[in-house]
Image (tube, rainbow, N blue to C red):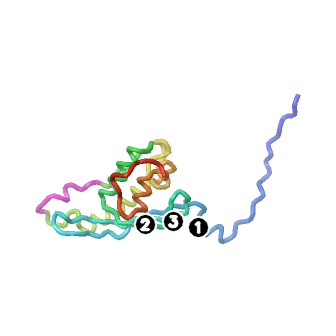
Amino acid sequence: MSEATVADTRRLNSKPQDLTDAYGPPSNFLEIDVYDPQTIGVGRNRFTTYEVRMKTNLPIFKMKESCVRRRYSDFEWLKNELERDSKIVVPPLPGKALKRQLPFRGDEGIFEESFIEERRAGLEQFINRFHGFFLICLYRIAGHPLAQNERCLHMFLQEESIDRNYIPGKV
């Protein structure tokens, strides 16, 4: 008969953590923020854009920092592309606010500062959260391993303009 093997329960030798390790940048990170809403145009040609800033050290992204301006419709495009091309459940976007678009309102409707800020926060929450991990857990959209490989996400975060005729696929 062979001897029963006993599990080794000794601790691994590791170096003590110093201040650089404790307070330095994490080994892998992806930060995305939605900033600086700007309303452009007049009348029916009026819309709001948002600055989307990304910082990362993940090797899958070709640029480590980027800053692009996106409209609400660009966020809708990203959501639709991710739903179509990946096996990930995408969280809802903040609503379209159809009632705010009705004529003869006593306020600025969708161009009111409080609404723009509320939408900006909702878009930031959308881009930073993702129902994922095979439909079970909440994860970050861009941080989700299945979404990180999607060409549409890279285009959304890093390209000045979105080519809506692109060929879907992995990076």
Would residue 24 be found to the left or right of residue 87 on screen? right
Q: Position of residue 149 (x, y in %)?
A: 49, 51
Q: Position of residue 90 (x, y in %)?
A: 40, 48
Cα separation, mark 1 vs mark 3, equals: 14 Å
Q: Which residues are magenta?
A: 95-104
Provide the residue designation for mark 1.
25
Provide the residue designation for mark 3.
64
16 to 166, vertically: above or below = below
Would residue 3 be found to the left or right of residue 103 on screen? right
Provide the residue designation for mark 2.
53
Label 2 environment density (alpha carbons within 10 Å; few <14, some 14–19, many ≥20): some
10, 167: nearer the viewer: 167
Name which residue lies at 37% across and 48% down.
Answer: 81
127 to 133, vertically: above or below = below
Label 3 environment density (alpha carbons within 10 Å; few <14, some 14–19, many ≥20): some
64 to 130, vertically: above or below = below
Specify whether residue 78 is painted magenta: no
Q: Position of residue 132 (x, y in %)?
A: 47, 46
Which numbered disc, 2 or 1, marks the residue that appears first in the sequence? 1
State which quadrant residue 44 falls in: bottom left
